[in-house]
Image (cartoon, grey):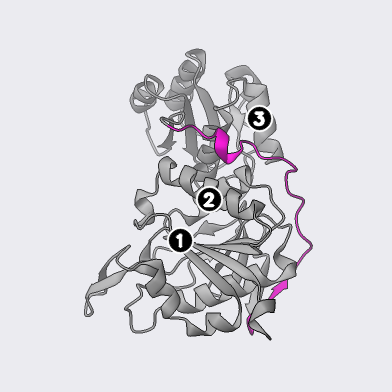
């Protein structure tokens, strides 16, 4: 294929294990965010046959240190590239620890038709069998393919394709670390081409917030409290004095001890938005089933994980503190 006909793909790098360098080959110890985007691309010369690539370094951090400030910068740049008719798709390299949160965040602020594909790696760039190069190749190939359009941000890891809303990191180690427990993977990469298992899910027609509407300084504070046996309300009461929102990573159907639920009701009375999610990793938290959400003033997370419920609540609180409107956002996004 002549070079002039190759798609134009923008690669935005944020760091992570994919850009990591081993400090001890025997133990596998490494430092994330050691290599720049140019080095990542140079390790995959086959990309030259797929696309004309432009590369930018947005950040270079382990994704445990991903921040709202970097999210805003990333979203603004991605939005500008999506508006540029010369750009056919965007690929984002990212650490795996919070990749699912960034993917879901972008799905809420970038309702665009162009492919946006995120990837990471479970092994550092200098590992004996690094998975980053093949994930990067597959991500660029996916971003070039017309079947990736209109699906919102996608995640490609270990040849599996996932939708931003459903993907979760489900293992702390090993290259098969990502799954979509409630929906299953959206497709697979085979021979550098995507094979999707279903039609594109309908995406929200508008952004919850446009990137240029994201706060430049402090974002609404939303904390997560993890339910467990004999949890009292002390930590929740403390959170309620600082946060605008609290997400309960509850047992089972988003439940907790009586003491914790009473503390969450006190938080609601103080104007704090409370979302009930589940710590189980799959399933759906229903409204007004075992807990009377209407009476308590709670919001049910549906099939959102606690961490994704936190992303949505953070953005939702930029617009409203009305519980009914926040519940409607959860139900529609």
Mark 1 and mark 2 lie on one chain; the one further toward the N terminus is: 1
Name the residue located 49 percent from the left edge and 50 percent from the top edge. 74
Please give the residue where the numbered disc 2 appears in the rendered image.
Answer: 77
User: Which of the 4 image quadrants contains residue 34?
Assistant: bottom left
- State the image coordinates of residue 273 (x, y, percent, origin top left): 53, 24
**Was residue 297 drawn as part of the magenta stretch in this picture?**
no
Find out whether the residues at labels 1 and 2 contact each other: C-beta distance under 8 Å. Answer: yes
Question: Is 236 on the left or on the right of 80, as rendered?
Answer: left
User: Which of the 4 image quadrants contains residue 240?
Assistant: top left
**Which quadrant is home to the C terminus?**
top right
Please say if 36 is above or below 240. Answer: below
Q: CA distance from mark 3 to mark 1?
A: 37 Å
Relative depth, front residue between 179 and 216: 216
Q: Nearer the viewer, mark 3 or mark 2?
A: 2
Direction top: furthest residue: 269
User: Can residue 288 be seen in this snapshot?
Assistant: no
Mark 3 and mark 1 lie on one chain; the one further toward the N terminus is: 1
Q: Which mark is residue 56?
A: 1
Q: Secondary structure at mark 2?
A: helix
Direction right: furthest residue: 199
Relative depth, front residue between 155 and 251: 155
């Amino acid at each position: 294929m002549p070079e002039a006909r190759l798609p134009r793909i923008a690669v935005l790098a944020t760091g992570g294990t994919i850009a990591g360098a081993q400090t001890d080959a025997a133990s596998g110890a490494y430092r994330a965010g050691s290599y720049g985007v140019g080095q990542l691309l140079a390790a995959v010369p086959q990309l030259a046959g797929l696309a004309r690539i432009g590369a930018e370094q947005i950040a270079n951090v382990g994704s445990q240190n991903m921040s709202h400030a970097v999210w805003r910068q990333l979203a603004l740049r991605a939005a500008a590239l999506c508006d540029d008719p010369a750009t056919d798709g965007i690929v984002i390299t990212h650490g795996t620890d919070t990749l699912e949160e960034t993917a879901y965040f972008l799905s809420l602020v970038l309702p665009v038709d162009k492919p946006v594909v995120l990837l990471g790696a479970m092994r550092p760039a200098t590992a004996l069998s690094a998975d980053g190069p093949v994930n990067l190749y597959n991500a660029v190939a996916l971003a070039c393919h017309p079947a990736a359009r209109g699906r919102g941000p996608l995640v490609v890891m270990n040849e599996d394709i996932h939708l931003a809303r459903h993907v979760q990191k489900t293992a702390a180690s090993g290259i098969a670390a990502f799954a979509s427990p409630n929906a299953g993977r959206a497709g697979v990469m085979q021979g550098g081409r995507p094979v999707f298992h279903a039609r594109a899910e309908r995406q929200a027609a508008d952004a919850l917030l446009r990137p240029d509407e994201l706060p430049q300084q402090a974002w609404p504070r939303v904390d997560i409290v993890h339910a467990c046996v004999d949890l009292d309300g002390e930590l929740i009461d403390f959170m309620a004095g600082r946060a605008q929102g609290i997400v309960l990573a509850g047992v089972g159907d988003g439940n907790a001890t009586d003491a914790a639920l009473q503390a969450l009701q006190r938080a609601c009375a103080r104007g704090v938005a409370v979302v009930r999610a589940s710590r189980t990793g799959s399933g759906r938290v229903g409204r007004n089933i075992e807990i009377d959400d209407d009476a308590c003033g709670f919001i049910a997370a549906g099939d959102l994980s606690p961490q994704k419920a936190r992303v949505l609540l953070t953005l939702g609180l930029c617009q409203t503190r009305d519980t009914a409107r926040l519940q409607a956002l959860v139900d529609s996004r």
